[in-house]
Amino acid sequence: AKRRGRNTWQRFNPGLARRQQDRVQIESQLRRALDDDEFHLVYQPMVSLHDGRVRGAEALLRWRHRTLGEIMPDNFIGQAEATGDIVRIGAWVIGQACHQICAWRKSGLPIERVSVNVSHRQFLGEELPQIVAAALGKCDLPGSILELEITERVLIEEAPDILATFAALRALGVSLVIDDFGEGYSALNYLRRLPIQGIKLSRQFLQGVPENRSDVAICQAVAGMAKGLGLSVVAEGVETIAQRDFMLDLGIEQGQGFLYSRGLPPLEMTEYLRRPSR
Ligand code: C2E
Ligand code: CA
Ligand code: CA
């Protein structure tokens, strides 16, 4: 599904043996990397598909490794989840994103919303609401500025206290949306029981739009269901005008993708926010 973004390995690793070596290096260095400040965030604008105006941004993690160079998240998040390091790294991401929102607000660039990806390991732990509350509190930010993207996996692997976690986050004003909607599981019953505000239509289903009939049917079904349930929808992986127009026809009004912008380092995102319109 993730056609791009995967090639990063190739940049620094020609052979399989090398790749395995890199993997071992990555796993053993995740913790050190956090202490050594090797992580940073880029921000991908989320825009109104009508007029391209910025509505928010998704924070995406990057690792600038001292010898391997820039490593994309698909090449280390899985391992960070397996080792449990994702819990600390994820807390750093939330703190860093809030810090950035604060900087934007201070320079007169009020951004409506920043989304942060939260791994199931983080969500099923107990301390997430406290971590979020502390990050917001540090800069005196309203919770409504933060959106957490969780995957369907969180909802399926239901831990006993998941409802309490949802309630605590909602009490802070934070929104919860389902990332990569439709990619993982087909159970929908959680949509009735859990306080979810929106979904992100997986870019997997946008790829074939508007030519592929099954992709089209799935996008239509998701859009209809979201509307009926009162959920917001963001289309991800919008790469072409045709995809944008098709989403608008379905009543999907927000999107993100290379048609608008890739993930931008903070300074470039600041410029993007400054530009009046495009
Ligand atoms: P995701 O949450 O689905 O994030 C969107 C990914 O799609 C990003 O890849 C982004 O660069 C890419 N993308 C955006 N627009 C387009 C487009 O038009 N076409 C295509 N082909 N791709 C597009 P990235 O940054 O490599 O992130 C990959 C995944 O890593 C993310 O997928 C997310 O699951 C995970 N991830 C990223 N940052 C974090 C984080 O801070 N914490 C956790 N737990 N996971 C993260
Ligand atoms: Ca995401
Ligand atoms: Ca996604």
Image (cartoon, grey):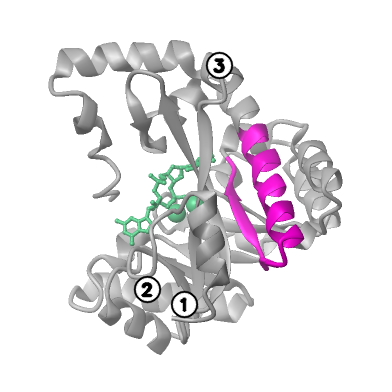
Label 3 element class: helix
Q: Residue at x 34, y 27 (%)?
A: 69
Between 248 and 26, the residue placed more toward the observer is 26
Q: Earlier in the sequence, mark 3 or mark 1?
A: 3
Q: Which residue is mark 3?
A: 31
- What residue span does the magenta drawing correspond to? 90-118
Query: Residue 272: x percent and y percent?
Result: 50, 66
Compared across the picture, whether 137 is left or right of 247 comes to: right
> Is the C-beta separation of discs 1 and 2 under 8 Å?
yes
Q: Which residue is mark 1?
A: 223
Compared across the picture, whether 205 is left or right of 251 comes to: left
Neighbor class of circle 3 (other Cα within 10 Å; few <14, some 14-19, many 20+) is some
Query: Which amino acid does the dot numbered 3 rest on?
Result: Arg
> Can residue 192 be found in the magenta stretch?
no
Between 184 and 243, the residue placed more toward the observer is 243
Tell me the CA gap for discs 3 and 1: 40 Å
Q: Earlier in the sequence, mark 3 or mark 2?
A: 3
Query: Residue 8: x percent and y percent?
Result: 27, 36
Quadrant in the rendering for residue 232: bottom right
Tell me the CA gap for discs 1 and 2: 6 Å
Compared across the picture, whether 80 is left or right of 140 comes to: left
Q: Reply above or below: 157 against 173.
A: above
On residue 219, the disc is 2
Label 1 element class: helix
Query: Which amino acid does the dot numbered 2 rest on?
Result: Cys
> Is the C-beta separation of discs 3 and 2 under 8 Å?
no
> Can residue 102 be found in the magenta stretch?
yes
